[in-house]
């Protein structure tokens, strides 16, 4: 085999390796793992010393990843590329003036900058200093665009997950506005890795902000008085967000990160999605109660009905549990909360739980088999029996049903079907009967 044949064979093997690599990118779950894999691939395919720069929330790019054993001092720590990059296209920097400005002093070669992005502004850059041939640039560009698409999916997925967890907290039960706001803020902090947070609201643009939720003593005296709707101040250690409420008013959120794990663009996007969920909820509360701190938000029939609409569109299977207290008298709010808390502990985090306008507590178990629904109903019943014996909750009648079924699968129809046959609220230990 002559030299030309060997080069052609190497090229074909490299193309095959590239295709396998691209097909496996979707299976890499973490942002940093994906970027590290791309750096290693550049070294294996073309023997290139590539570095990855991550966009800082200030807008500049900071050196974040490189090959083990690579010379760290050969590359600048920070890159200001706003005047150099052309969208998400790869860019070659070769003029001495540009190289000096970027931090490559007395460097005699060119620098290739490849953004890891498809549709959005790039959060990561692949940077190679030195000669890069056309085949290597084309291959790295294709790989970077594919990796960028996967990164965007990861960001969207995390934002959706954090916002969904916050929404489930808000829909889990009835309670005073500050109680649910505190729960939502704690869920938001956990979702983005923040250690401290504050949530404030103004009923009008000219009003004074009042604190609804607080985590962390250092933010207790922090002034969020300048709440301009659309405000977004972001640094590696602090996020400030302000959103307008439906019908008037503004909600403001401040989050602080631990120094060891600063915020990135992924965390910022997730925080914005969750903040929008909180603002939507508070807008409904404001319309119903005028944001009285002792007020309870409206029952969550609408949220559960919307989830049932989604279930029907996707042809998902599952079940509904319904706990009711009888018609003699409605229990106090703290007793209802104890029942909701007990049910939540026996259900999955993905199960939706809320109190309806009729007073019942309904749990929607999506993507659960018939056995799973029965098992969940059994666990909840045993927990509620124990609460009743210990006088920590009123007698509760519990029923359940499955969907889809022969009848209508609206929320009202499912609740009615689950309530047709159930254990006796006057004697919850006896008379239990599953409703199918």
Image: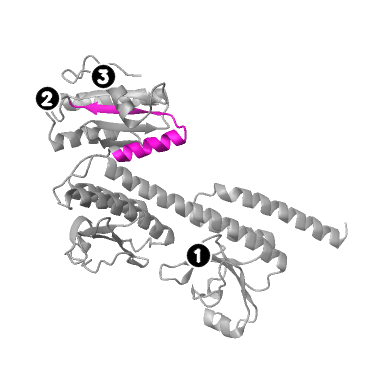
Asked which secondary structure carries label 1, the reply is: loop
Q: Position of residue 129 (x, y in %)?
A: 61, 73
Q: Is residue 319 magenta?
A: yes
Circle nearer the N terminus (1, 2): 1
- The image quadrant where one finds the N terminus is bottom right
Asked which secondary structure carries label 3, the reply is: loop
Identify the residue position indicated by label 3 in the image: 422
Identify the residue position indicated by label 2 in the image: 328
Asked which secondary structure carries label 2, the reply is: loop
Q: Is residue 48 magenta?
A: no
Q: CA distance from mark 1 to mark 3?
A: 56 Å
Circle nearer the N terminus (1, 3): 1
Residue 382, image quadrant: top left
Task: Name the residue located 31 percent from the left edge and 29 percent from the top edge.
Answer: 412
Q: Is any part of residue 43 visible from this angle?
A: no
Identify the residue position indicated by label 1 in the image: 121
**Which sits in the foreground, 433 or 62?**
433
Q: For mark 1, does the 10 Å Cα neighbourhood hold few (<14), some (14 to 19), or many (20 or more) residues?
A: few
Q: Position of residue 38 (x, y in %)?
A: 59, 58
């Amino acid at each position: 085999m002559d030299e030309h044949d060997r080069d052609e064979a190497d090229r074909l093997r490299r193309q095959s390796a590239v295709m396998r690599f691209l097909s496996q990118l979707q299976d890499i779950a973490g942002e940093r793992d994906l970027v590290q894999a791309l750096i290693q691939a550049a070294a294996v395919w073309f023997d290139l010393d590539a570095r990855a720069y991550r966009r800082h929330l200030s807008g500049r790019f900071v050196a974040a990843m490189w090959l083990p054993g690579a010379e760290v001092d050969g590359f600048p720590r920070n890159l200001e590329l706003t005047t150099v990059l052309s969208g998400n296209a790869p860019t070659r920097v070769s003029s001495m003036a540009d190289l000096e400005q970027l931090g490559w002093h007395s460097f005699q070669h060119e620098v290739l900058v490849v953004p890891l992005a498809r549709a959005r502004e790039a959060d990561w850059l692949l940077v190679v200093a030195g000669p890069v041939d056309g085949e290597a640039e084309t291959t790295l560009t294709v790989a970077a665009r594919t990796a960028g698409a996967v990164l965007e999916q990861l960001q969207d997925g995390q934002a959706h997950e954090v916002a969904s967890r916050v929404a489930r907290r808000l829909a889990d039960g009835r309670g005073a506005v500050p109680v649910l706001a505190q729960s939502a803020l704690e869920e938001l902090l956990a979702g983005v890795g923040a250690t401290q947070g504050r949530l404030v609201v103004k009923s009008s643009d000219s009003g004074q902000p009042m604190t609804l939720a607080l985590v962390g003593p250092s933010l207790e005296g922090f002034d969020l008085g300048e709440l301009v709707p659309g405000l977004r101040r972001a640094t590696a250690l602090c996020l400030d967000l302000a959103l307008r409420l439906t019908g008037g008013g503004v909600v403001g959120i401040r989050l602080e990160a631990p120094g060891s794990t600063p915020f990135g663009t992924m965390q910022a996007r997730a925080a914005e999605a969750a903040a929008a969920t909180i603002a939507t909820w508070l807008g409904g509360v404001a319309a119903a109660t005028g944001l009285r701190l002792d007020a309870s938000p409206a029952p969550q029939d609408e949220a559960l009905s919307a989830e049932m609409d989604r279930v029907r569109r996707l042809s998902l299977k599952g079940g509904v549990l319904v706990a009711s207290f009888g018609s003699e008298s409605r229990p106090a709010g703290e007793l209802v909360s104890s029942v909701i808390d007990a049910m939540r502990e026996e259900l999955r985090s993905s199960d939706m739980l809320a109190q309806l306008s009729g007073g019942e507590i309904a749990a929607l178990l999506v993507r659960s088999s018939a056995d799973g629904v029965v098992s969940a109903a059994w666990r909840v019943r045993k927990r509620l029996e124990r609460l009743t014996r210990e006088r920590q909750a009123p007698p509760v009648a519990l029923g359940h049903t499955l969907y889809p079924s022969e009848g209508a699968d609206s929320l009202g129809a499912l609740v009615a079907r689950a309530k047709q046959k159930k254990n006796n609220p006057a004697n919850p230990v006896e008379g239990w009967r599953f409703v199918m």
